[in-house]
């Protein structure tokens, strides 16, 4: 696989296909991370081993996210992030209602 700049996230964001995301979009992606399965947000690195074999390594989300990007994401509203990334972002997952405890007498 081609080597990309550290300013480009290589992940499998859309339909399991390699997706390139420029760093300026990372805060919006991090802000909306709850809308994606974590495996889609893992950073993908591919390399050729000395034997010529192809090896793929993944850095799980959020381990690859720089602190400055996390800070920017914290100051980005969901609406702002959606405006930056566009309509292809999956809808928000509905909140899961917690089971209520029965009152004891």
Image (cartoon, rainbow, N blue to C red):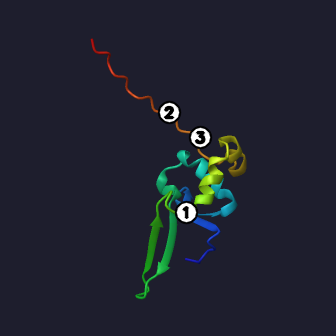
**How far separated are the C-alphas under marks 2 and 3?**
12 Å
Q: Which mark is residue 95?
A: 2
Residue behind mark 1: 11
Asked if 10 appears above or below 85 in the picture, the reply is below
Figure quadrant of residue 104: top left
The outermost residue toward the left is: 105
Q: Which mark is residue 34?
A: none
Q: Specify which label sits upstream in the sequence, 2 or 1.
A: 1
Q: Residues within 10 Å of mark 3 (few under 14, many from 20)?
A: few
Give the quarter of the figure containing the N terminus.
bottom right
Q: Nearer the viewer, mark 2 or mark 1?
A: 2
Asked if 11 appears above or below 79 in the picture, the reply is below
**How far separated are the C-alphas under marks 2 and 1?**
26 Å
Q: Position of residue 80 (x, y in %)?
A: 71, 45
Residue behind mark 3: 91
Residue at figure coordinates x 42%, y 82% from the top left: 53
Look at the numbered disc 1 and give the secondary structure of its residue.
strand
């Amino acid at each position: 696989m081609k080597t990309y700049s550290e300013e480009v996230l290589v992940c499998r964001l859309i339909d399991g296909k390699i997706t390139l995301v420029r760093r300026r979009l990372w805060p919006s992606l991090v802000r909306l991370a709850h809308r994606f399965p974590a495996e889609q947000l893992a950073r993908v690195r591919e390399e050729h081993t000395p034997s010529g074999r192809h090896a793929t390594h993944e850095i799980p989300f959020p381990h690859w996210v720089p602190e400055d990007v996390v800070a920017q994401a914290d100051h980005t509203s969901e609406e702002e992030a959606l405006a930056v990334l566009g309509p292809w972002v999956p809808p928000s997952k509905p909140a899961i209602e917690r089971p209520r405890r029965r009152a004891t007498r």
